[in-house]
Image: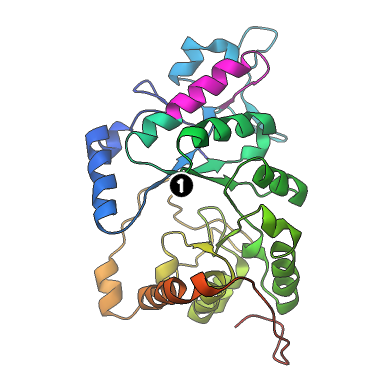
Amino acid sequence: MPWAIGSPEGGHDAVHPALGTLEDFDWFVERARELGLEIALDFALQCSPDHPWVHKHPQWFRHRPDGSIAYAENPPKKYQDIYPLAFDADFEGLLAETVRVLRHWMAHGVRIFRVDNPHTKPVVFWERVIAEINAADPDVIFLAEAFTRPAMMHTLAQIGFQQSYTYFTWRNTKQELTEYLTELTGEAAAYMRPNLFVNTPDILHAYLQHGGRPAFEARAVLAATLSPSWGIYSGFELCENTPLREGSEEYLDSEKYQLKPRDWEAAEREGRTLTPLITRLNHIRRRVIPRCSACGTCTSTTPTTTP
């Protein structure tokens, strides 16, 4: 994340005043439920310097010899607005607080948590958190947002994460897709539930940047038909594909740093939206995928790219 969690107004169990109140959030969750949607909440275990935990639980952070709290670093980059947690001083305290925060949002209707970078925290921590939550609420889903070594991604799935991010975003040629889907449907299928995202807030692949609408359509069809779970990030429906700069996977005018209004009705009137295709794909998934038990590949003499 490009920002840290928390402010003087509250921490992981609060709503930023600019976004509304908990009552507004409850209304949002209920309205989504009326429309047949579920709300998933991003869960990032890191803090801003003014997060309430910094003052209430200083033992949860690493300290320098001068007594100051160590901020996040990934040399040569320094993230002075982010305080990473230390799990060795009060493991049980952090565990209990994490479970409390999750149950707080569960009480407000959230049953899906997308965990940010779980591979940067102790594996046993997540194993215990998920086990404790699922013991009483087995329907709660944890999605591992972990773009890391395959072995670690598989380990996270084995210790309890019900869904996993994948490398699908970077698999575009026929050979890449064939090899990767063969891997996902092999032995790993016994414990790993892949989620094929066509894009994310951080990843706008060059294939979408240069492929135009046909590339967006192709990736949507592939993701929707090759996995039980698939995902799209806001703006994909409108084929938004302008990068921050050439060679970058970051979006220009990224929503990570600003609110970005979109005129969905105008896009539909003008035929600029993929919503009809996405709707059709989801109808097909509901009707056909429950009867499917495996994914296979067919040889083809067409070019190696997907469109």
> Disc 1 marks which amino acid?
Lys
SS class, disc 1: loop
**Which residue is found at the position 29% from the left and 39% from the top?**
19
Residue 74 visible, this angle: yes
- Nearest the viewer among 153 and 212 is 153
In the image, taking residue 305 as reference, residue 262 lies left or right, namely left
Q: Which quadrant of the figure has residue 68?
A: top right
Query: How far across and down, in percent of the image, does residue 132 sit?
Result: 53, 30
Residue 89: say if magenta. yes
Question: Is 90 situated above or below 109?
Answer: above
**Which residue is found at the position 57% from the left and 48% from the top?**
162
Question: Is 127 situated above or below 171?
Answer: above
**Which residue is found at the position 59% from the left and 83% from the top?**
307
Residue 132: say if magenta. no
Query: How far across and down, in percent of the image, does residue 36 sit?
Result: 30, 59
Residue extent of the magenta highlight? 83-101
**Residue at the spot of label 1:** 256
Question: Is 287 situated above or below 227?
Answer: below
**Which residue is found at the position 47% from the left and 11% from the top?**
56
- Nearest the viewer among 27 and 261 is 27
Query: How far across and down, in percent of the image, does residue 28 sit?
Result: 26, 46
In the image, taking residue 76 as reference, residue 228 lies left or right, namely left
Residue 122 visible, this angle: no
How many marks are shown on the rendered structure? 1
Q: Which residue extends farthest bottom?
A: 301
- Nearest the viewer among 17 and 186 is 186
